[in-house]
Image (tube, rainbow, N blue to C red):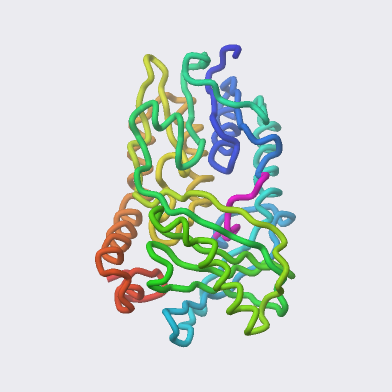
Amino acid sequence: MEAADVVVLGLGPAGASAAAQAARAGCKVIALDRKREAGVPVQCAELVPAMLPVEAGVVRQRIDSMRTFVEEDAPDPTPHFPGRMLDRAAFDASLVREALDAGADCRLGVVFKGFPAIKAKVVIGADGPRSLAGRAIGSVNRELVETRQVTVPLLRPHAATDVFLSAAIPGGYGWLFPKGEAANLGAGVSPSHKGRLKAIVSRLHRELLQEKRVGREVLSLTGGAIPVGGMVKPSGFVGEVLVLLAGDAAGLANPVTGAGIAAAVHSGRLAGQAAASGDYRAYEEELEDLYGAALERALRRRRELLDSKMQKSALRRGWIAYPEYWQ
């Protein structure tokens, strides 16, 4: 690899945002991703908060509320829960285009060979929950949730995110997120229960089929890991090379909801700025100020829930829709 000021590992939301920001600051940027096409395959439930600015063309549907189902109880509504369902592949592609337009050299279909091949002052690790950059500096996401998701036909319009909390979904939750004429139906569980994921998602699918809310056909299948252990140390050195972590690599996904796209975009931009300035301490402080308290609360609620053996009262206390979560 030829020399660069900044090498970015990963071209998801965090990496593409970092590459664009560093390039705008005048850095020579090379960004690598093993995927041959940005955002493909999709490994995401595709929901983002309404406050995240996105191009209109990548939005599949607007969300206005949330419904939470605790075991067999009637759903508890959260009337004001604004969000957007994305076409995640189109969203990722739009961010890569922004990075290219800013002057970053974005290379898809390239496998990272390790730090001996890197010739850069700064490496930004935006390479996901099992980040190689993070491993190189000893910042490893040690707590993960494993997920499985199918996309199915949606038989009637729906503008809410449905969340299913149950002891039968250990260490996570189930979801139905609508996106126009289809919906993402999935679940996440603690890694020790990964072998149950297929059955859990199939059971949710059968129940929604019986309610005539979704169709039988499975349009697509995906899955992956989400970091749920809170933020890891987001900077370090490999020799003289400064390494910054962003997005899931930095453990910024919410330990309760698994949401991480907005944090990935924002932390990527901050990492790009820090790479240009070299001020990694300011980067660490900014991440702590922005995400530290929320991640600590979510991590505490998650651990309380696991310790309770997923009791019904703990399911409510451990979910963002309920006042108990915020107390």
State the residue in front, 324 or 192: 192
Q: Quadrant of the N terminus?
A: top right
- What percent of the width, then of the height, locates residue 49? 54, 61
Residue drawn at x 56%, y 64% as measured from the top left: 186
Relative side of 323 to 49, left or right: left
| Magenta region, residue range | 40-48
Viewer-proximal residue, 65 or 195? 195
| Foreground of the two, 213 or 284 | 213
Residue at 41 percent across and 32 percent down: it is 134
* Residue 166 sits in quarter: bottom left
> Measured along the vertical axis of the image, is residue 207 above or below residue 222?
below
Q: Main secondary structure of the magenta part?
A: loop
**Does 5 appear above or below 13?**
above
- Image coords of residue 120 (percent x, y): 50, 16
Give me the residue at 65% from left, 44% from top: 39
Find residue 254 and report its horizontal and vertical position in percent. Answer: 41, 55
- Note whether 318 is above or below 192 in the view shown: below
**Residue beneath the point at 37% across and 50% down:** 291
- The quadrant where residue 302 appears: bottom left
Residue 230's x, y, as percent? 34, 49
Asked whether residue 96 is drawn in magenta, I would say no
> Is residue 42 inside the magenta stretch?
yes
> How many discs mark residues in the rendered view?
0
Q: Tell me the quarter of the image containing the C terminus.
A: bottom left
Q: Is residue 248 left or right of residue 295?
A: right
- Find residue 323 and report its image quarter: bottom left
